[in-house]
């Protein structure tokens, strides 16, 4: 499970709690703080929990920074984290800061829930479909952006992607990673979700496999479609498959929720989330009878996100 659910000694209540921290992966400290907070909250949202009672912030400040770097970067990261927490209806009260060689930011999210406020992730049934609420390819986009300054790396991908494409993909990844999965969590209740997980460090297939493993019923997940940030599938291929994006092993940061939904309600879920957020969600696979495993078919369909570029628009 993405969060631990601990029954309390106070009648019928459970403590739901999760923790996470990450290293910098974008060059904007404020956005980095937002991404780190969204990443922590995502584990609550994967259980359909919409309210977070409190957040702690965990901060590793690098002793390799100059005083000036530290005085500019750290407050911006903290502000981004705090703003994202407030966007989620929570606040940051407490935490810990340490000086060490590495810059890290993360936190702990805690909430007290009644049983109807969370959705256990183990109730998928044959005939359900799998919905994904954010595109894949964040790791590829971030790396490609860093390679703009590394000629030997850039030369490997410049035949399949322009500099402008890479910059746009990086912006798309950054805004996707900083977006909260809160609307998706709310709609899980409305559309009777049978379980979910968020897609982060183990990649799509890693998290799908973990979710399949905990199912009560003898089911397996089969993934047919891969929604990927535009042009990043081509970049992945041009790199000789170092990211394993098409195989579902590319790491994501603060990715979308992977949700098992009743087939007849999945399209309405996707339509509803797009109406509320302005971002798409996709039906990417099915739940069939099986032995609690997950797989991606041999030739999955790549969905470029967005389908076509519009001038001046990210999505």
Image (spheres, rainbow, N blue to C red):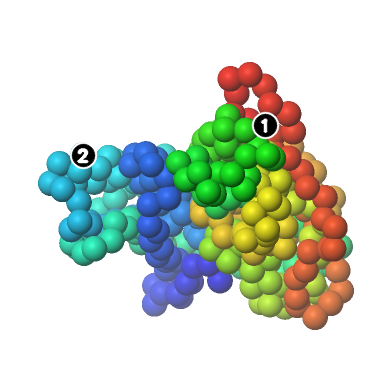
Residue 275: assigned label: 1
Q: Return the x and y of residue 217 as percentages of the image width and height.
A: 77, 77
Position above or below: 113 against 140: below
Q: Of helix, strand and loop, which one carries label 1?
A: helix
The residue at the point 51 percent across, 54 percent down is 253
Earlier sequence position, callout 1 versus callout 2: 2
Residue 266 visible: no
The residue at the point 19 percent across, 46 percent down is 70
Q: Nearer the viewer, residue 23 or 116?
A: 23
The residue at the point 24 percent across, 46 percent down is 74
Q: Is residue 221 left or right of 105 when viewed as pictured? A: right
Total count of labels: 2
Q: Return the x and y of residue 101 as percentages of the image width and height.
A: 24, 63
Furthest residue toward left = 67
Residue 142: assigned label: none
- The residue where tag 2 is placed is 72
> Quarter holding the N terminus?
bottom right
Q: Return the x and y of residue 267 as percentages of the image width and height.
A: 80, 44
The residue at the point 57 percent across, 33 percent down is 163
Residue 113 visible: yes
Q: Is residue 144 left or right of 282 when viewed as pictured? A: left
C-alpha separation, residue under disc 1 versus residue under disc 2: 38 Å
Q: Of helix, strand and loop, which one carries label 2?
A: helix
Q: Return the x and y of residue 216 as percentages of the image width and height.
A: 72, 78
């Amino acid at each position: 499970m993405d969060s631990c659910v601990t029954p309390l000694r106070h009648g019928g209540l459970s403590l739901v709690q999760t923790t996470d921290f990450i290293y910098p992966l974008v060059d904007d400290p404020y956005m980095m703080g937002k991404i780190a907070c969204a990443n922590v909250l995502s584990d609550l949202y994967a259980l359909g929990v919409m309210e977070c009672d409190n957040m702690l912030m965990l901060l590793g400040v690098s002793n390799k920074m100059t005083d000036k770097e530290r005085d500019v970067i750290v407050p911006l990261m903290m502000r981004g984290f705090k703003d994202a927490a407030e966007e989620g209806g929570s606040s940051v009260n407490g935490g810990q800061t340490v000086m060490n060689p590495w810059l890290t930011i993360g936190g702990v999210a805690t909430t007290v829930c009644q049983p109807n406020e969370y959705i256990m992730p183990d109730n998928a049934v044959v005939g359900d479909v799998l919905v994904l609420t954010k595109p894949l390819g964040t790791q590829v986009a971030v790396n490609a952006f860093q390679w703009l300054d590394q000629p030997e790396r850039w030369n490997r991908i410049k035949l399949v992607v322009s500099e402008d494409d890479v910059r746009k993909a990086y912006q798309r990844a950054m805004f996707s990673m900083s977006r909260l999965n809160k609307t998706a969590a709310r709609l899980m209740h409305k559309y009777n979700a049978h379980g979910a997980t968020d897609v982060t460090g183990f990649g799509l297939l890693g998290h799908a496999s973990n979710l399949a493993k905990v199912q009560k019923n003898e089911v397996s997940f089969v993934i047919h479609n891969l929604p990927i940030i535009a042009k990043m599938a081509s970049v992945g291929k041009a790199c000789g498959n170092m990211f394993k994006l098409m195989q579902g092993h590319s790491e994501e940061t603060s990715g979308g929720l992977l949700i098992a939904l009743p087939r007849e309600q999945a399209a309405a879920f996707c339509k509803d989330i797009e109406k509320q957020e302005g971002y798409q969600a996709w039906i990417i696979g099915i739940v069939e009878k099986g032995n609690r495993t997950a797989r991606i078919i041999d030739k999955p369909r790549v969905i470029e996100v967005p389908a076509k570029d519009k001038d001046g628009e990210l999505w």
